Amino acid sequence: MDYEAVIGLEIHVQLNNATKMFCDCPNRPGDEPNQNTCPICLWIPGAMPRFSQVVLEKATMAGLALNCEIQKENAFDQKVYYYPDLPKGFQLSQSHLPLAKNGWLDITDENGQPKRIRIHQVHMEEDVAKLVHETEGHTPISLVDFNRAGTPLVEIVSEPDIRTPHEAMEYIRSLRTQIRYVDSAECSMESGTMRVDANISIRPKNSDRMNTKVEVKNMNSIHNVGNAIAYEITRQANQLQKGEAVVLHTRLWNPDKHVTEAMRGKFEGPCVPDPSVPRIIVTDEWLNTLKARLPEMPGGKAERFFKDYGLSRDEAVLMSSERNLSEYFEAVVNQDIPPRFAVHWIATQLLPALKERNQNVEDTPVTTERFSQLLSMLERDEINANSAKEVLAQLFDSTETPGAVIEKGGLRQVSNTSEIEVIVDQIITENRSAVDDFHNGKTKAMGFLVGRAMQASQGKANPRLIKEMLSAKLGNNT
Amino acid sequence: MNPDNYCYIDHSPTETGENGTLKGKLLSIQPNISVRGWPTEAGSVALEGFRALEDATVTERLREAGAKITGSTRMSELGFGLTGDTTPLAISDGDVDIALMTDTMGETRLAASIAGAFGFKPSYGLVSRYGLIGLVPSMECYGIMAKKPEDIGSVMGVIAGCDNHDLSMPEYQVPDFGHRGKIREPKVVIGTVRECMDTLDTDERKAFNETLSQIRKMGLKIRECNLTDFDLFKTVHNIIGSVEASSSGGKYDGVRYGHRARSTENWNEMYLKSRAESFGLLIKTYLFQGAYFQFENYSAFEDACRIRARLIKKTEALFNEVDLIVLPTRRRGINAADTSTIEEVYDAFSLTLPANVTGLPAIHIPGSVFREENDPGLQLIGPRLGDANLISVAAALSHTTLGGK
Ligand SMILES: [Zn+2]
C-alpha cells in the first residue's frame, strides 16, 4: 500500500533577549554553571516572577514574522511536572491563552510548487535547567545547572500540513529566516537555540484520516530532522505492513546509529492558570508600534530584487535569505555595481571567504565601500578577475583601499595592446604544436594558449584582449 | 512574652526609620513572611532549616516606618487554617501592638475573633505579596490584627501600594488611610446577605440580629440583599485552593532546602519519600485533592473558575445597593484553632472565605454582646479598594456601639 505522512512540528526557539524571562539574570546558558542565577530563577520561596517587557516584544515580533494574529489577551499557565530540571514543579507556559494564533509560512515543495504550511499557535514559555550526569567515584550523580532556567522561549506549533522530510526542512529554514529577520532569535539547531520536535503519523495515500502519531525528539540539525522523519515514516510503514498498530509514544533520534529509539514518557498534566504573572492585554497602539518596526520581510524583498534588479529567482532568494546579507547586497548595488555582477561576486567569492574567516557581512573589514570599489575596478577592466580575488583576500588583512592594494601589488591589468602583442607573438612562437592543434580544429587549444599568455604576463594581462589578439593572428579555425 | 508562642524571637536592636508613622510599635510576623536571615519554615518540615534570603516588601516598609518586628509566632502548616497558630496570644497577652499574618481563607479575622481584636484583610493586589511563602496565590494576602483599628490604618498606610517586585498588582489609586477612626460617610448603608442568614442556626441568628440592632441604633441603615449561590463560595475556594496549592506547592520538594529523605533509589522515589515525610496529614490531603482535580477532574476546576468569576461579579454588584456588606465572622460550636480535616477547616472559615474568593477587603470587629462562645462576631466587607473607609467604619462602630476599646 502507498502511504503518506502527516507531520506537524513543534519548534522551541530561544529568544535573544539580554535577560531571562522573569528576572534580570543574563540570558547566557553557556556561562560557568550556575553563574546566572538569582532567587527568582532558582524559585526560592517568597520570590515572584517579574515578566520582561522586552521578552514580550521579541516574542510578539516573532509572532508577526510568522504571519500570526497576536491575541488581545494572553496569560501564563503552570505546566506541572516533577523532574530535577524543574525545581518548582511547574513550567510557566501559555496553554489556555497563547500569545499568537493562525499564522503561516510559504515554502517550495519537491516539485518546485509553492505550498502554505499553517501555524496553529505561538506561545511563550520559560526554559528549564540543564542536568549534567557524572560519577563521583563509582556513584552516578546528577548536577543541575540553572543558567538555562527561566531563559525565554517561544514554542511554534504548526498544523499537521507537512507531508515529506523535504517540506519539513524547508519549513524550518523559512521559519529561521523569518525570525532572524526581526532579530528575535538566532535559531541555530547546532548551538541549541532552536529545538525541533516532530509529530509523525502515516496513512494510506489520499485518505483524510488522522492516525496515531509518534513524537520524535533530539535532532541537532535541520538535516537530521529530515533523516529522522524519513526513518520514522519507513519504520511506521513497515510496522503497519506487518499488521502491528502504531502506539502513541515519544522517540529519540540517535544521530550516530541513524535510527529513532523509544523513550520513557514524561508525566505531564493539564495546565493551571498562574496567578502571579499578570495577564497581558495587547492594545492596538502598542501592537502598531511593533508592526511599524517590522522590516521588509524576505518574501517581499526577494520579489523586489527579482523585479527591480533583474536577478534570477534563485539569486533573489539567496540575496534576501538573511537580513544583513540583503542589506549588504543593496548597499553594493547602490554604489553603482550592476546587481547580477554583485550577486555573482558575493555568492562565489565574498561568502566563502567570510565563512573561512568566521566573519559575518555586518562585522567584516571588507565593508560595502571597499567591496564596491574593488568590483567597480574589475568592471572597468582595470584589474582582471584573478587579481580581484587576490585583492579581496588582502582586504581582509589590511585597512588600505582596494586601489592602494592594487598599486602596491602591481596588479593593475595590462590592457596596453602593444605590450600584449609582444606576449602573444612570443606564445605563438613557443607553442607551435598547440597552434597546429588549433588549426586542426581543436578549439581547446585556444584556452591553452590564452592560459600560457596570462602566465607570461604574471596574471596581469586582460584575458579578453589576449583572446581577441590570438584569434586575429591565428585566423578562424573553422 | 511566652517563648512557647514564638518560633523565633529577635533580640537585635534593629529599629530603623526614626520618624516613621509606626515608630515604637511592636509587631509580630509569622514564619512565612520573609525577614532576611530569619528562620522561615512556614510551619512545615518541607521548609525545615530554610532562612529567608531577602526581606519581604512589607518587612522592609514596616521597618522603614519605625516598627519593631519582635519575632515570629507559631503558625499552621503553610498558613492553611489556624491549628497550632499562636498569633492570637501575641495580641491578647499584649506582647505586640500589631500582628502580621497570612490570610488564605480568613485566618486573620478568625484569629482576631479569638484574641478579641480587629482582624483586617486588604483588597487583593493592594499589598505586595513579594516575600510571602504561600500556598494559594490567588486567594492569599497579608492580614493585619490589632487591638486598635488606628494601628491597622497606619500599617496599611505603610505597606499598601505598588511594588516593582510584585507585578501581579494592578495599577490603582492607593486609598488614603489618613482619616482613621471616623466615619466619613455617616449615612452608610449596610447590607445583610439573605442566603447567608439562611445558613445560620436559631442561636446564631438571634445573636447576630442583636448585633445588627445595635448598628441600627447608631443610625446606620441596614438593608437585606440577595447573593444567590452563596453556598458555592466554600466549594469554589476548596477546589481552586487545593489545585493552586498542589501546583504551586510543587517547589517544596526537599531538594534545595527543607527536609530530604535519606537513602532513596532514584529521584522519583526521593520526591515521593521526602514529601511524604515532610507534610502533615491536612496539607497532604489538600495537595492530593488538588492533584485529583488537576489530573482527573479538570472540568470541575474549570467550572469552579467560572463560578468564581460569576460570584465576584454578583458580590461587586451589591455595592450598587449598599456601601458595605455585613456577615458574621464565625460559626458557633466550631473551633477554628482546632481543625483536623479539610471539611472542618472549610466549615470553620465558611463565613470569612468569600472575601478571599472575591479579593474584597474585610474586617472583623471585636466586642461581644453575648457570651463569647455564642457570639458569631461581626464582619464587614467593602468594595474593592474601599479599604480605608472600611477601617474607619469598623473603628467608629466599635467605639460607639459595641463596647469595644
Ligand atoms: Zn535570575
Image (cartoon, coloured by chain):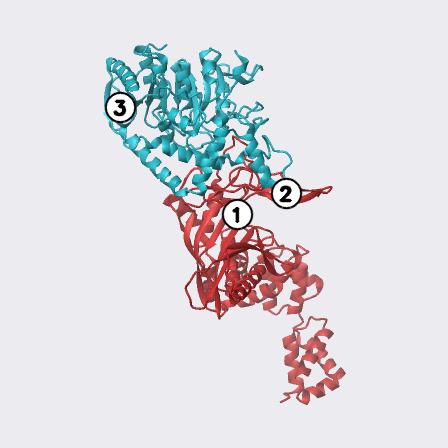
Cβ atoms at labels 1 and 2 below 8 Å apart: no
- Residue B268, label in figure: none
Chain A: its colour in the image is red
What chain letter is assigned to the residue under label 3? B
Q: Is residue A404 above or below residue B67?
A: below
What chain letter is assigned to the residue under label 2? A
Chain B: its colour in the image is cyan
Please tell me which residue lies in front, A236 or A366: A236
Q: Tell me whether marks 1 and 3 sit on the same chain.
A: no
* Label 2 packing within 10 angstroms: few (<14), some (14-19), many (20+): few
Point out the residue furthest to the right here. Answer: A430
Q: Nearer the viewer, mark 1 or mark 3?
A: 3
Image location of residue B41, percent across then percent down: 55, 26
Please tell me which residue lies in front, A63 or B7: B7
Q: How far apart are the two marked residues, 1 and 2, measured between alpha carbons?
A: 17 Å
Please tell me which residue lies in front, A154 or A443: A154
Dot 1: element: loop
Q: What residue is shown at x 68% (from left), y 55% (from top)?
A: A398
- Residue B191, label in figure: 3
Q: Amino acid at mark 1?
A: Leu
Mark 2 sits on what residue? Answer: A31
Lower sequence index among marks 1 and 2: 1
Q: Amino acid at mark 2?
A: Asp
Ligand 1 visible in quadrant:
top right
* The C terminus of chain B - image quarter: top left
Q: Nearer the viewer, mark 3 or mark 2?
A: 3
